[in-house]
Amino acid sequence: MTSYGATRMYKGSAWRDSHYLFRLSVLFCLIASITNSDTGEQMSTWWVSEGPVCSAKEKDTAKKTLYEHLYLAKNDSQNARMLPLIFNEHECYNYLPINIRVNLHVTSIINVDEKAQSLTTLVKMITAWPNLNMMWYPDGFCGIATFAAPKNMFWTPDIDIMESIKKEFGANDSPNVLLFNFGFTVSHEVLSLTTACKMDLYRFPFDTQRCSITLQSPSYSMQEITINTIPDEKNITQESKERFQAQGEWELLDITYMKDILSQWIEVDQLIYQITIKRRPQLYAIKIIVPVFFFLVLDVISFFIDARGANKLIFKVTLLLSISVMLLIDNDTLPSSSERIPLIGIYCCGIFCLIGISILETILVNFLKTKGDKMRSLEKTAAVSGRDDRDLEKLTDSDIYENTSEEQICTSDGLKLIVTKAPAQLPTQQKDQPPTQQNQREKIPLSWTRVAKIIDVTFLILYIITIIVFMSVLWKLWIP
C-alpha cells in the first residue's frame, strides 16, 4: 500500500483541514517504517480498512477503552505529557527533529495604529505535531480514527510570536486537542494578535504596508524542533480572503512565508509570515485632498476679481484661514510618525504656501494701483489749482488734505469764479510748458497702473504653470 492510498482514504474527512496532514513528510516516513516491519502486511490492511459497523453503545464503550489504551486515564502518564519523541522507538525519528506544522489564516484586520506602529489582527492558527505514542488501530475501536482529549494532558509546542505586543484569545480557548490514529496531534486556536509593524507612511493614504508574524520556539533548538507551514502561499492567501470577515479601511492583498534561522544562544528555527495590506484612500481623498485642491482652484479664480477694492484680498485671506482650520480639525487623521515627510504633508504645505504667495502678490498689486490712483488725483488737483509739475512732486498728502478743506470752505461764488477762470488760464499754462512735461504728466499716473497689470498677468501665468508642475510631480510620487 503506497502513501497515496493512505492519503485518499482520509480525504473528505469531517474536519476541513485534516487532508493537509497526510502530505507531511513525517507520515511518509512512518508508513515506510511500518511497511518494512514484520507486521507490514497486517498494518497495510489496517490503512485501507473501513472499520466495523458498531452501534452507538458499542462506540461509547470503544471510546472508553481507547481512553484507557492511550494511558489517558493515568495522571502520571509521562509518555503523553513530555516531549513525544523521547519515548519514540521508530527508526525514522532517531536523528530527526520534530516537524511542527502550522497553518495560519488572517480572518480580520481589527486596527492599524500608525502612531504606535502596531497591527491588530484576528488570526486562526492550526498547529500539528507528531506524537507516535498516541497511535491505535481503528479496527480494534469500532473504526474510531480521531479522538478529542484534554489539552493539558499533552505536550504542546511552545511557539512564540516575536513581534507580539499583546495576545488574546479571540474566542474561548479550546480545552481539547484532536488526536489522529496515525500519531498526530492537532491544536486549533483563534487569536487576537497585536504585533509591532514598521510602517512607511510616505505615500499616505495611498500606502501599502507589509507586516511580519515570526513564529519560533524559545525553548528548543532547530536540532529538536523545526517549524513549517502546511499549505503553499497561494492557498494561504486564497483561504484567508475567503474567511476574511471585516471589510474596513484596509484590504488584504497577499500572505507569504519564508524560513530563517535565529542564532543567539542556540540556533532557533523560524517561520516568518509576511502580511501585505493596502489602505482604501476614498475617505481621505474626500475629507482632505479634494477640499484643499478646491481651495487652490478658488484662489486661481480670485485673480479675476477687481483688485481696486479690498474684496479680493479679504477673499484670499479667508481661503488661507479655511485651510488652516481644516488641517487643524484633521490633525489626528494625518500621520505623525514617519522617517520621511509624508506626501500628503508636502501637498497641504505646498498649497498653503502657494496661496500665501498669491496673497503677497495681491498686496503688491493693490499698492501699485493705489499709488497710481493717488498720482492721478494729484494731477487733477494741480490742474485745478494751477500748480506746476515741480510743485506737484513736492505736494504731500497733508497739502492735498488742506487744499481739499479749503475748497470745501469756499462759497459757491468762489467756486464759480475758479471754474470760469480755469479754462482761460489752462491754455496759457500749456503753451508755456514744454511738450515733454505734458507727456510726463500723462505717463506718471498710467505707469504704476500698467506695471501692476503686467505683474498681475505674469504672476497668474507663472502661478498656473507652477500648480500644474507641482501636482504632476506629486501625483507621480504619490501613486506609482
Image (cartoon, rainbow, N blue to C red):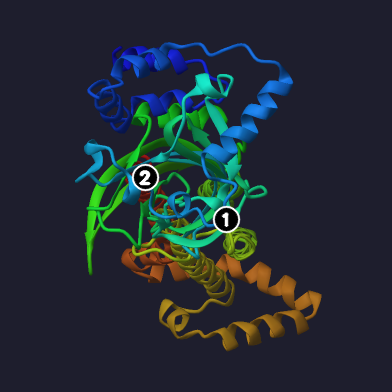
Badge 1 crowding class, 10 Å Cα cut-off, few under 14, some 14 to 19, many 20 or more, is: few
The foreground one among 417 and 100 is: 100
As drawn, is 11 to the left or to the right of 212? right
Visible residue check, residue 302: no
Image mark count: 2
Please tell me which residue lies in front, 367 or 268.
Answer: 268
Q: Nearer the viewer, mark 2 or mark 1?
A: 1
Q: Which of marks 2 and 1 is nearer the N terminus?
A: 1
**Is residue 34 shown to the viewer in this render?**
yes
Residue 245 % position (x, y): 61, 35
**Quadrant location of the C terminus in the rendered image:** top left
Q: Residue sitting at 47 percent across and 53 percent down?
A: 81
Closer-to-camera residue (307/49): 49
Quarter in which the N terminus is drawn: top left
Task: State the residue at coordinates (59%, 72%).
Answer: 384
Residue 75 tag number: 1
Task: Look at the numbered disc 2 and give the secondary structure of its residue.
Answer: strand
> Residue shown at 37%/52% (left/top)?
215
Question: Compared with residue 462, is residue 385 higher up or lower down, i.e. above or below?
Answer: below
Return the x and y of residue 17 as percentages of the image width and height.
49, 27
**Mark 2 — residue?**
273
Amino acid found under the numbered disc labelled 2: Tyr
Three-letter amino acid code of the residue under disc 1: Asn
Q: Residue 371: x percent and y percent?
A: 49, 71
Quarter-wise, where is residue 221 in the image?
A: bottom left
> Nearest the camera: 91 or 274?
91
SS class, disc 1:
loop
Q: Classify residue 15 as left or right of residue 471.
A: right
How far across and how far down the image is residue 68, in percent?
58, 40
